[in-house]
Structures are given as structure tokens and as C-alpha cells.
Amino acid sequence: MPLSDGGVAADGPVAVVSRLLTWSVVDGPGNRFVLFLQGCNYRCAACHNPHTMGLCDHCGLCVPGCPSGALTMKDGKVVHDPDVCINCDACLRVCPRHANPMVRHLSVADVLALLRENAAFLSGITVSGGEATLQLDFIAALFAAVKAAPDLRHLTCFIDSNGHLGADKWAKVLPVTDGVMADVKAFDPVRHRRLTRQGNVRPLASARLLAAAGKLYELRFLMIPGETDDADEIAALAAFVTELGLKTRVRLNAFQHHGVRGTALAWPKMSRQGVEAAAAALRAAGLQTVALPAVWLP
Amino acid sequence: MSDSLSQLRRITGDPTLNFRQKEHALAVAAENMLPYPPLDVETAAALDARLICDMYEGNAPYKPRYVLPDYEVVLKNGSAHLELPRPETLDEAINTLQIAYHHVPSVTGLPVFIGHLDALLLPFCDGVSDDDLYRKIKLFWRYIDRVLPDAFLHADIGPTDNRVARAILRVDAELKQIAPNLTFLYDPEVSGEDILRLCTDNIVACSKPHIANHPLHAAVFDAPGYGIVSCYNALPLGGGAATLSRVNLRKVAEASDSEADFLDVKLPRYVALAARLMRARVDHLFRRSGFFEGSFLVEEGWISRDRFTAMFGVFAMAEAVNHLQDLAGRPGRYGLDDAANAIGHRVSERLAELVAAEPMEHVWRGVAMLHAQAGLSNDAGTTPGVRIPYGSEPDPVTHVRALLPHHRHYLSGVSEILTLDETVRANPEAVFQLARGALRMGFREFTANVAGNDLVRVTGYMIRLSDVQAYNEGKTARTNTTSLGAEAAAQTPILNRRPRVVGLELAAGAGA
């Protein structure tokens, strides 16, 4: 199996990683080491990381536009040299597949080594994306290895997911997972399909399953003006969380233009006022923890 | 009118200085009309070219740069000179300290150290309720900020977790004042994580306290101990620092042909010249100024003549390393590239060797102490100490890991400031993780600014952004450091960088 599609190498599963961070304060509790895994099964117009959606098919369209010469074609494959790369992201802008030729391939051992280097500063690790759970075997192996390592087992293991994963698959990873941040993109099924090109039966089922397992750290809801900010959506969110348990932590995110490409750039940005009004409505409905964006961009 | 008279005239008519600030500026100007302590030609030339720098401390040093009295002396004995009885109650103890502060000199004219306040006040707290303690500390804090309004003024607390330290942290977060600056001395064996978490929560609220790695500092100093003062200088308690001179590493690198030339020829040369400069200044203070002969602080044992070190400062490490990289044709930049960082670590190691080999008469232990110096508000084109240049800082964890190997060499302090994005407010646990991790890995001190706080550090001292705004509009600043911050803000990119708000430190001749 070619490594660019992830998969299993001789010494275990290998992840296709779009980016990694040793400092993140917005991907779970405390400071988190974050792996953004490449590839997503949704095609949300509002995505703020659209370059994490696709996997490279080595078409080579990005190579001529690389100003530093970090990208070359070798044996029909796009090859990236990180030592030469100037991180200008020109390749991301020309890629027709929303892929990223700068991905790294990391084994479980690679990630454990990175965690050990940074462990003194970390509360835990979060795998995000893309849709992290598309590389579920890697996640399961990584988290199991963290839990088995005496010097790392204090780190909490979190997944950030769109919730499309089925129950049987969750069962593979939940025993080694401490918490999941799960999205519900919209409660109206038609709207959900319009926004993501997928239905919302699976994300709703995932949220219920995770809540029942005590693993739902946070339910995330992106407010988009004219779409998910309407009263019916907020009322449906309130009803859903009431069903899950009023203690469920809910995070309202506000649609912004940063990172967004294409048609969604024509959509208005979500106002602070609108998010705060929704938060007030949710609190009035009895929700105990409603988190809002930490920073409001002007 | 002569230039010097015009200068005095300008000070007396400056509408942005209050009368006390004018007095201080006039005194500095008058001192600088005197001849400089005798220097050899080579040293004088290096000083003129500012390869070495005397921090504009003044031409006739008549007081040590930093004085760290052992305030326990006056709390235990009272003071014959000040006609103060030994205090018996918490009110009397605080009142005694408030009086004492007015008699402690420093380069700024205001004390830079006001004591290990929890250790000093705890013996007076028996029978004082938590609520009373909180109220008294609050009044004390207000007094300090309003009467001694200088952000170089520094209080220490810790390493124990105790009532007074907690009351101080509570009041400090509530009042968000510029003064006093505050350091918690953290010892993982003694302090416990609860109070470290209180400290990091306070950082989120008001970018204070600074957290010092107590076991690392304690190992450097002897039994009377040390204090953290001014811009995070670690100095002997019951003494202080006679002087601080510094080497501009950027200029030394620019005078070098290669890394080898820098490390083997030019750096030794300019370290030697800076040492000569320091000896001349120290000699004047100890033998000509009469300070130690006429001081009741010495007579009553608040300070000892033999406990004053000399601080050997360096700055512009980043520019020096980048220049050496350019000479070698390598693109990697300081802070971001392993090879560049490794050069920096070699430079720090070399500096430590060289400074330890320069004997200094009168000075505590006979040699100066290396210090990563935070800058002056009129520095341009240089980055303070060993910091990573503004705007090119990596994430905080990478940042700490890049600078860590420097820390063991800077025995009198390494002024580093991490700037944290405002999103961290929603996740204070991350600040705790970062601080604990950095200290565990061997960071000598941990200091952070949270972007978006009105109260921010400008390389070690605190300013209010709203005060800078008012100052720029021509209103008189209540606090001394505002004008320094405004100067730094105008001359350096400190306020318009990405989150980091740091800059060049004090005004020439005004402070630390």
C-alpha cells in the first residue's frame, strides 16, 4: 500500500499527517499535542481547513508553482523536501483535490518519540483533521501505545470528529480514548446534507453513543448565519442536549472567513451578538456548560 | 545657553513629567556633567562605539545599581537611625516596611526590592483573620503602587504555600496594578501544585507573577539567600548589584570574520573590555563615592559591603547568531533552526567561561555574574538578552525548548517572556502545563504575557497600554515606567507585533 494513503507498514500503521502542533489550547483540556490527519469524508463549504480534505493523487499540478523547489516529481510521485520548503502554501491553493503535498507520514513510534520530547508540557494528545477517524487503526494503535507506556500514560487521548463513524468502529477505539469532541453540523437533515454532502443520522447517533459511554467531552456546533443560527436549529440543539444530559458541554463556534475557500466566502460572518443570543437561549433551556469562542476577531 | 543647560531647561519644562520625575531626570543630567571614572583608551573607544554599554548608569556612581536589604533586620530590631521600635503587630510591620522603602536607593531612585513579603509578614499574622489579612494587603498594595510607582519595584513570595502569599496573589489579580512587580519562588518539593496553579491563573488575569525556579537559584547563592528584583535579576540578599554593564553581541559579531573568530578572538576581547569598564565603575562606587561609609543601611546590617555582585549583561544574541549564520552562508535563523540555536548555546557557554575568568575587586565572590539583559527603551535593531526576535517566535513549547540550554549559564537571571495568545484565557490549565513543564525542564524563570491584557510587560517591567495611549496624547504619567514603555513603543515594534509585547527595556539612565 502506498504510504501517501496511510495504511500499515512493516512496523505497524502509519498516519498521513497534515500538520502537528506541540502547543494547542483549543483542542481539549490543557495544552495538547495535536495531529491533524489528512483526509475527510465530508465536503463542508464552511471548512476552515479545506486543504486537509483530500489525499494526494500525484497529479503534479502543484510542482511547477512551488517557488522554493521543495516539490519535485520522482518516479511519478510528488515528493516534498521539508528542509527547502518555505511554508508559503502555494501548493495548497492550486490543488484541485483539496489535498496537501506537504503531509508527513508518521508511525506510532514516531509520534511516541515526539510525545516524549514534549511530555513535560502536555496534558494530552488530540487527533483532529481532516476527519481523524478515517485513520482509525492508527489512532487505536497510537492510543493503546500511549496507555501502555509508563512515562506517557498520564496523557489524555482525545479525538476531534465529525461523528460520521459507525458504532462498531467507535467500539474499537473508545476503550483507549478519554474523550471525543464531536460535531453536529445541523439538526435539519436537508440542511446537514446541503452543508456537508452527508446526512446527519450518523453524527447524531455518534453523539448519543459517546454521551452514553461517558466519552463525549464536548459537542460542537458551528453557527452559520442564515443556516444554523435560526431558532429551530438552536431549539433542536437544546432538545438534543437535554436528551444527552444537561451537563453535556456544548461549544458554539462562529463561522468566520479565515481559511475558508470558495462559495462560503460570500456568506456573512457570524456575529458575536448572534452567538451570545444563542448561548443565552441554550442556558435558558437548562444547558449547564455553553462555551463560546475565546477571541472575537474584529 | 550651553547644551547642558538647554538639557536641564528641557527637563524642567517637560509637561509629560511630574515634579518628582523631573527631579530624578535633573539629578541624572547633573551627574553626567561630571567626568567619567578613568578608562583606558581601548575601553573608552569600545564604550563610545557602544560595543560595550554602561546602561547610562551615570558618570559618578554614588549608589549601587540594585540594593536588596534584608528587611528582616528592621522587623526584628527596629531601627535606631529611623527611630523605629521593633514592630509587634501586622499593622506595625507593614508600616515599618513602608517607611523602610523610602531609604533604599537604586539606579531608579526607588527601591527595586521590597522583600520576601510572605516570609517577612507571616510571623505577624497569628490571630489575624484571612479577611483582615486580605484588607491590609490590599491597602499595602495600593500604597506601593501610588507612592512608589515604578514597575521595577519587585516583591518576592514563596516557595511555601502560605496565607500571605495567597492573599497577595488574590489582591494582585484583583487590582492589576503596575507596581509592585511580583515573583513567586517555586520549589516543586515545597510549594505544591495548588499555588503554582494560582500563579498561572494570575498570569492569565494580569501577566503576573513571574515564576522563578527556586532550587536552581538557591544552588547559586549562599545561606543568606537571594532575591529576584527589577527585571528578573537574581542577586544576593543583604547586598545586591554594584553595577550592570553589557556587551552588544550583534556588534561584536559584526566585527568578526567567522564563528571561530567571534568565539576565540572578538568575544574574549570585548568581554575583557566590559570587565575593565565594570572595574572602573565598581572602584568608583566602593572607593570614591562614600556610599558604604555613610549608609545607616550598612551600619545597622540591612546590607553588607561584601555582598554586592557586578552584573555582566549581554543582549542581541539573536542578531549575533543570525550574522554568524550569514557569514557561514547558512539560512537557518535563531530560535527556529537547530544549527542556529546550537551556535547560540555555544556563545552562552563561552560567555560563562570568559566572565568567570575576569577577577573583580570588591565584588561578591570576586567575579561578575552573567545576565541575559532585557534591553533599553532606546535600543533599536537588537533583541533583548537571548530572546527570539519579535514576530518570529515559534509556539511557546518550541520556544522554551529552543532557549532552555541557555538558562544554566545566566546565574543572575535570564529575562525571557513568552507571549500567549488570548485564546489561552479559556484554558488556563494550558498555562499551568507550560509553566510546570518549563520549570521541570530546567528553565531558570518563567514569565508570560497574555495578549490582550491591558497590563503588559515591556521586557520585564509592567506598563498599561491605556497609560501609553494617554502618555502619547500628552498627559502626565503617574507611573515612572510609562514613559519608558511609550519610548519603547515608539522606537521599537513592541506594540504592533503579533501577540508578543516585549521590547526594549528602560530609558537610558533610568533603570533596569
Image (cartoon, rainbow, N blue to C red):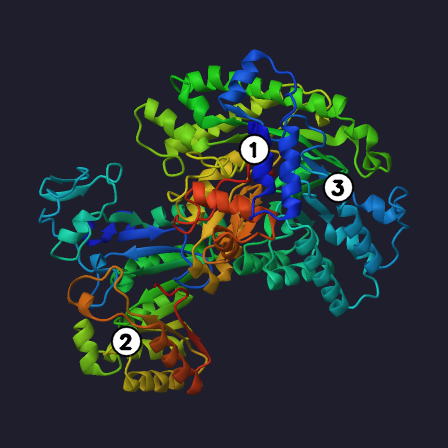
Between discs 1 and 3, the one toward the N terminus: 1
Q: Which of B54 and B452 is in front in this view?
A: B54
Alpha-carbon distance for marks 3 and 2? 67 Å
Q: Which of A4 and B142 is in front in this view?
A: B142
Q: Work out whether residue B469 can be spotted.
A: yes
Helix, strand or loop for disc 3: loop
The residue under label 1 is B6
- Side (left or right) of B442 relative to A206: right
Q: Which of marks 1 and 3 is in front?
A: 1
- Say which mark, if any, is on residue A203: 2
Occupied quadrant, residue B219: top right
Alpha-carbon distance for marks 1 and 2? 76 Å
Residue type indicated by callout 3:
Val
Mark 3 neighbour density, 10 Å: few (under 14) some (14–19) many (20 or more): many
Which residue occupies 67% across, 34% down? B65
- Side (left or right) of A94 relative to A221: left
Which quarter of the rendering shows the C terminus of chain B? Answer: top right
- Say which mark, if any, is on residue B507: none
Location of residue B104 in the rendering, given as x and y in whole percent from the top left corner:
75, 41
Q: Which chain carries label 3?
A: B
Occupied quadrant, residue B292: top right
Location of residue B169 in the rendering, given as x and y in whole percent from the top left corner:
64, 59
Which residue occupies 79% across, 45% down? B71
Q: Mark 1 lies on which chain?
A: B
- Say which mark, if any, is on residue B104: 3
Alpha-carbon distance for marks 1 and 3? 31 Å
